[in-house]
Image (cartoon, helix red, strand yellow):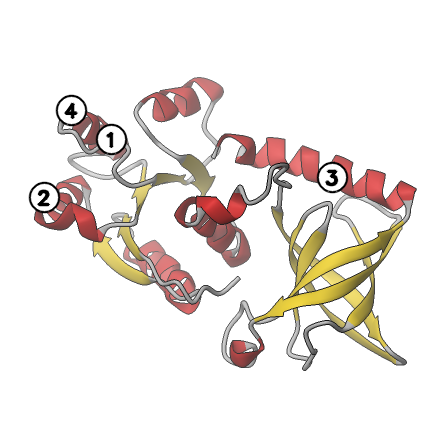
Amino acid sequence: MITKDSKSVLVADDSIFFRTKLSDILVEAGHKVRFARDGREVLSEIKIDSNGIDLLVLDLQMPDIDGFGVLKWLEENGFKGKFPVLVITGAYEPADVIEKLRGLGASGLMTKGYTPEQIVFRVNRLLFPEKAARGTMPRERVPVSIPVDFIIGDLSRTGFLLNLSETGTFLHTKEDLLTGAMLRLKFTLPGGDKLIEAKGIVKWSTAEVASKTLFGGYGIMFTTVSDEDGRLLKEFIASETKRLGLQHD
């Protein structure tokens, strides 16, 4: 979840509470953050140094110039597509609003009710599209926060899964695991009651920051999943992908 490839994110929101909250999450995830308090400050920041912006996180409801106004200005002044724009809103928007945002160049939409893990997932998906699309058959990966029991050798431990795909997961734990270690994982999908059991191998880690950040842990590749559990994973990921709009990012 934490990245060593730091990017510059411009956060535009008139709420100091949300600006601070979002900044804390993104800085802890490894990024650099600048602020704009309203639409006019967004335009000013872009005019000063558009090349220094890797991502704009844009509140839809702002005084003076709102998110729609900023997107329209970007389009009219040749900045559309120069950097991704992740729109944030206090409520789910109807389909026609979402289509209007996409027509104006928005790269994605999220609500302010998202968890820190979901925010980092959405941001990193836009900042590192080459990683999201790696391989000829990219696997959808959805943000989650699922308690998990995992067994390594004869030891049983607990942690959280912070994202999930058909082929693997990110395991958040402060336990010291070695790359290449084999694990057995047991967890229940949100809204389900069947215990999912899978075997996996530790492929990579952010263990050096595990004790200092919300996002320390290990990338796990599944090696063994039953047909039934694999079907449940596939159905859950497809449902979450559709619900979160990730297939259009």
Residue sitting nearer the eye, 165 or 34: 165
Residue wearing tag 2: 47
Of mark 2 and mark 4, the one earlier in the sequence is 2
Residue 181: % across, % down: 76, 73
Give the Cα separation between the discs numbered 2 and 4: 13 Å
Taking the spot 20% from the left edge, 38% from the top edge, the residue there is: 63
Residue wearing tag 1: 80
Q: Are there few (<14), some (14-19), or many (20+) residues within 10 Å of tag 1?
A: some
Give the Cα separation between the discs numbered 3 and 2: 43 Å
- Badge 3 marks a residue whose secondary structure is helix
- Badge 2 marks a residue whose secondary structure is helix
Question: In the drawing, does residue 206 fall left or right of residue 94?
Answer: right
Of mark 3 and mark 2, the one earlier in the sequence is 2
Give the Cα separation between the discs numbered 1 and 4: 8 Å
Give the Cα separation between the discs numbered 3 and 4: 40 Å
Question: In the drawing, does residue 19 fall left or right of residue 70?
Answer: right
Question: In the drawing, does residue 92 fall left or right of residue 235?
Answer: left
The nearer-to-camera label among 3 and 1 is 1
Residue sitting nearer the eye, 173 or 90: 173
* In the depicted structure, whether residue 42 falls above or below residue 203: above
Residue 109: % across, % down: 43, 36
Q: Are there few (<14), some (14-19), or many (20+) residues within 10 Å of tag 2?
A: few
Residue 172: % across, % down: 64, 68
Of mark 3 and mark 1, the one earlier in the sequence is 1
Of mark 1 and mark 2, the one earlier in the sequence is 2
Residue wearing tag 3: 236
Residue wearing tag 4: 76
Taking the spot 74% from the left edge, 39% from the top edge, the residue there is: 236
* In the depicted structure, whether residue 239 falls above or below residue 21: above
